Amino acid sequence: MARAAASADRGRFITLEGGEGAGKSTQARILAERLAERGLPVMLTREPGGAPGAEAVRGVLLGAGPWDGVAECMLHFAARREHVARSVGPALHAGMWVVCDRFADSTLAYQCFGQGVPRSVWEALADVALGSLRPDLTVLLDLPPEAGLARAAARGDTNRYEELDPAFHARVRAGFRTIAEAEPGRCVVADATDSPEAVSAAILAAVQSRLSPPP
Ligand code: TYD
């Protein structure tokens, strides 16, 4: 399950990240469809969730709270460990292209940058839960929080996080941008205020240039 760019037949791990209402779920679905059209074996998944136990933890995370920040980090990483152990890891090992709606960067942005949990907590949990597994490519769908929150409200599917104050969402956005700037080899930033068509074209271009899937 290691980063294992080393192994020729390991699949590829692509994550989509961003704040509320950035269009991650739509874009993850479109990307998975485009890759499948090329004949690639694809798994589309999401966090928190993506495996039965992880979906159960998702219900706890979104249904209860507010949580102590460290406890919340631990719950996200417990769900992530289950997801990686049962779904993502085996799929990558089988040579699949895994497209995941949110992953560990969300915990860094929401719980550390947003809620003030020390980064060292994230690092310790990532070490235990993920070992060396990291995405091959992360696309950050970036947009001002007020625009994203308005979209999410219009969809009518607000959750506990969306109801947090605007300053929290501003810290989350800044956190994601800081992560992307620190790891330009892994991360690409797409302007999520563009049309869905333009955003999906930008994502496909990034996948093409970074991971070179077959035409
Ligand atoms: P979801 O309905 O999937 O939101 P979205 O459609 O915006 O992806 O709910 C997941 C919520 O959980 C979302 O508000 C962000 C939050 N979250 C964290 O705070 N930390 C994490 O590590 C993850 C994966 C999600």
Image (cartoon, rainbow, N blue to C red):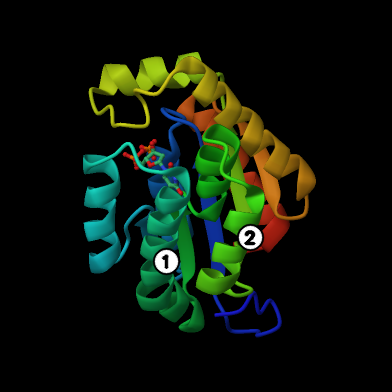
Q: Residues within 10 Å of mark 2 (few under 14, many from 20)?
A: few
The one of 125 and 193 positioned closer to us in this rendering = 125
**Hey, what amino acid is under mark 1?**
Val
In this rendering, is residue 151 above or below 105? Answer: above
Residue 42 is tagged as 1
**Marks 1 & 2, CB-CB < 8 Å contact:** no
Question: Ligand 1: which quarter?
Answer: top left
Which one is earlier in the sequence, the residue at label 1 or at label 2? 1
The one of 45 and 127 positioned closer to us in this rendering = 127
**Residue plotted at (22% across, 50% down):** 59
| Residue 142 spot, x, y in % from top left | 59, 30
Q: Secondary structure at mark 2?
A: helix
**Residue plotted at (47% across, 64% down):** 98
**Residue plotted at (39% across, 64% down):** 78
In this rendering, is residue 207 above or below 53? Answer: above
Any atom of ligand 1 within 8 Å of the CB at mark 1? no
**Hey, what amino acid is under mark 2?**
Glu
| Residue 179 spot, x, y in % from top left | 69, 43
Q: Secondary structure at mark 1?
A: strand
Q: Which residue is mark 2?
A: 123
